[in-house]
Amino acid sequence: MQRRQLFQLAGGAVISTALFSFANKIEATGIKNNVLSTPLKLNFNENSLGMSPKAKQAIIDRLDIGFRYPDDQREELISLIAKSFSLNKEQVSLGNGSSENIQAIIQALVAQAQKSAVPIQVVVPDPTFNYAEIYAESIGVSVVKVPVMDDFAFDIDKLKQAAESFKGNTIFYLCNPNNPTAMITPATDLFSWIKNAPKNHFFILDEAYAEFVQNPQFKSGVELIKQGQTNVAVVRTFSKLYGLAGYRIGYLLGVPEIVKLAESYMSFDNTNLAGAVAAIASLNDPKFAQLSLASIEASRQIVQKALTELGLKFVQSNGNFIFHQIKGDVKTYQQRMKEYDVYVGRAFPPIESWNRLTLGTPEEMQHFITILKLFREKGWV
C-alpha cells in the first residue's frame, strides 16, 4: 500500500502520524496486503497483515527436516522467550496455543486442591474470554461469573467478595486487556490485590493482547513473577501480534514451581516444528512487530473516526479489536454483515447492542466503514 492510498483512506489532505508511520513501514517490506480477502474476517482477532516474511521463510527452510522431532527448536524458543522477559528457562512453559496453557494450569490447581480435599472454584468477570470457564466446567468445577461494571471495567470488589464467601480455594481468571472490551485493569489496582490476596487465591492473567496496549496504567504481570509471587501465572500467545494463530504457539510464565505444576498437565511433544521456527523468526524480526502495531493503530484511527461521526459509542481500545455500540440485536447485525461478506464478532451477553470488531488492515477497515455507513442509511445501526 502506498502513501497516496493512505491519504485516500484517511479521507483527505490531513493524515495522522500513525498512518504516516504505517506507510513508511509497509513500503520497506515485501508484504502484499492491498487485496481484500473474501469474506472479510473481522471476527476472531487475527492479524490480517499475516505473519512476518521471515517467519514464513523459516517454515519453508525447515520443510526438509519435518521428519525430526523439534526438540532443538523448542529449546531455542523457550530460551528466546525467557530472555525477552529477563526470566529463566524454568519460568517458561510452551503450549499448543495459550488455550492449552490455560487448561493445564486450571487442571493442575484443581487436582492439587482435590488431593487435599479442599473445595475449589473459578471466578471470572462477565463477559470475558470463556476458555477458563469451559475447562473448569468440563471437570466439574463451579464457575462464578461477576458482571463487569457499567463502564465495562472489572468489578474488583465483587470479584473479591465471590472468593471471600467461598470456603476453599479460588482461581481468578483475568484477561488483561479484557476480551471482548479491550479494557485494561490498572496495575495499581491489580498488583495490590494480588500481593495482598489470601494464600488460597490464585490468579491467571491472560495477556494475549498485551503487546497492543497503549494505556500507561497497564503493567504486565511478569513484573509480579520477577518479584517472586507464587500465586500468579501469565499466559501469552503468538497468535495476535505475530499472526501465527494457525501454528498454535502459546506460553505460560511463572515462578519455577508454578511452571513445573502446569507442565505436569501439559501434553508431551506439544510443539510443532513449523510453529516453533516461525515464532523464533518472529521474535528476531522486531521490524515486523512494529509494522503490525502501526497497521493496527492506523486501522484503529479509521474506525474510531467513523464511529464518532456516526455517534456510536466505543471503548478506547487496548487490543487489536474495538468494542462498539451498534444500537440493535447482535445476531441480526452479524447476519446482515455476513450478507455483505463481512464477518464480525458474536454476541457477548449480558452486554447487549455492542459488537466486537477485529481491526484488520487499513484497507479492510475502510471497506468495513463503507458498509457500516450503508447500514446507517438503512437504519440498521
Image (cartoon, rainbow, N blue to C red):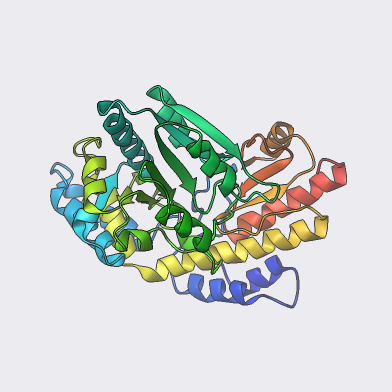
Inspect this view and state whether residue 42 appears. no
Horizontal side, residue 91 vs residue 177: left or right: left
Q: Looking at the image, which residue is at 68% across and 62% down? A: 302
Please name whichever residue, 226 or 38, is drawn nearer the observer in this view of the structure.
226
Residue at 52%, 32% (x, y): give it: 144
Residue found 59% across the figure and 76% down from its top? 20
Determine the residue located farthest toward the top in the rendered image.
Answer: 140
User: Compared with residue 330, is residue 8 higher up or lower down, i.e. above or below?
Assistant: below
Q: In which quadrant is the N terminus drawn?
A: bottom right
Residue 202 appears in the figure: yes
Q: In which image quadrant can residue 117 be found?
A: top left
Q: Quadrant of the C terminus?
A: top right
Residue 198: % across, % down: 40, 46
Q: How many circles with numbers are drawn on the protein? A: 0
Vertical order, 81 against 272 (above or below): below
- The foreground one among 314 and 124 is 124
* 111 displayed left or right of 352: left
Q: Is residue 147 left or right of residue 209?
A: right
Residue closest to the eye, 66 or 282: 282
Q: Give how far across and how far down residue 206 sits, in percent.
A: 43, 49
Picture coordinates of residue 171, whole percent (x, y): 41, 39
Residue 128 in picture, x, y percent from top left:
55, 41
